[in-house]
Image: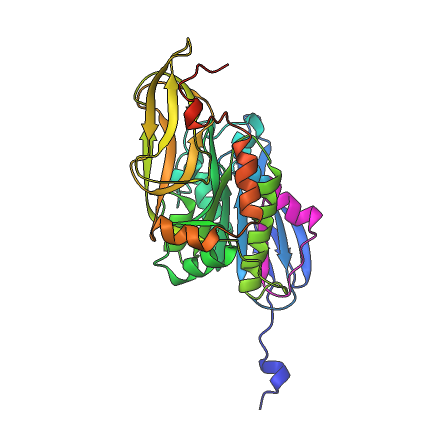
Amino acid sequence: MPTAKSTRRKQKPIKLGMETIPPGESRDVRLKISETYTGDEIALPVRVIHSAKPGPKVFISAAIHGDEINGTGIVHDLLYDEQITIDCGTLFLIPVVNVFGFETHERYLPDRRDLNRSFPGNETGSLASRIAAIFMREIVCQCDYGIDLHSAAFQRTNFPNVRADLSNPDARKLALAFGCPLIVDGRGPEGSLRREACKAGCPTIILEAGEPWKIERGILELGVRGIRNTLIKLGMLTGENIPPAYQIRAKKTTWVRAELGGILRYHIGAGDWVEAGQPIATNYTILGQAQYTLTSPCDGVILSLATLPAVKPGEPVVHIAVPTRSLATIRKEVEKKSGLSHRVRRDLATNIAMTKLDDSSDAPA
């Protein structure tokens, strides 16, 4: 008859590429994804933290767009400033997925494909498709959960928000646990890592925060806190979950676009709440004459805004998330609260020129 000790579940070694990591060890692995023109190996840097005790397997990835490096900074902080250890399970920490774009400070791969529209990939397909297939096989299919870290696209900034398919119970659990002030519900675009990872049985959420080409202090703090919150929820870390000062959920978003060419002066910042009809930005001629004021089409939260104030007709100015609850209800809950999310809002606002509406008729200095 087997003893209790013999029936206790044991942790198995983890294999990644050509490396085998025994239980209770951490190892830096270079996972081959391609080759240079001269035949030299190109590899993903991966830190594998493999606890001696069985538990969830989680990947945390960044820079799938090569110019979005806030996530790289978050993973870096987890590895070095935080010196993260886990009580059980396995962590795969990937600070840079798109190593090609990271080297050249570009969003895309050399073939101009978007890696985050190329999943689940194909082992015999294009460069993007092959990298996606390797990442799915070696990382995603070994994991129970995933967190993918992003920043805004070129010439934009994002107020920190978690995006997840809230109809998936496990993705919903991760999204709520992360503790971001804003959650946007959705499955994600076709070919995106989080959408295809969820299809493959690895519930995955993303954090969208800050600007490309930057590592921003408040975003780092929020990202590290959110990942720790999530790992605590999964039982991989011991500690107290730190909730946000407030949390808003949105299922719908809408863009406001420029109507005329000119220079913008904003009246709001990323993370601000706006009401339908509220002025968002005034458009000036190049010689300083106010010519048009953009207004919000709905009640919502400023999810993203352009950091380049020069616009042409049709170019995106702000992205608004429409909350599932009324703005009045949300304001009552949060008006007396403050915290990290408020500090991040203030920091993001310093990166754009903001003008009170009463001053919008004056020519900018």
Q: Is residue 180 magenta?
A: no
Residue range in magenta is 73-96
**Camera-side residue of 225 and 323:** 323
Nearer the observer, 252 or 206: 252
- Where residue 222 appears, x then y in whole percent? 57, 47
Image coordinates of residue 171 in percent, x first then y, are 42, 57
* The quadrant where residue 198 appears: bottom left
Disc tally is 0
Is residue 356 something that shows in the picture?
Answer: yes
Tell me which residue sits at (61%, 82%) in the image.
6
**In the depicted structure, whether residue 1 falls above or below residue 280:** below
Viewer-side residue, 121 vs 150: 150
- In the displayed structure image, the side of residue 167 where residue 35 appears, left or right: right
| Residue 240 placement (x, y as % from top left) | 61, 63
Residue 257 in sight in this render? no
Quadrant of the image containing the N terminus: bottom right
Rendered view: 326 above or below 35:
below
Whether residue 93 appears in magenta in the rendering, the answer is: yes
Spot the residue most to the bottom. Answer: 1
Residue toward you, 97 or 156 = 156
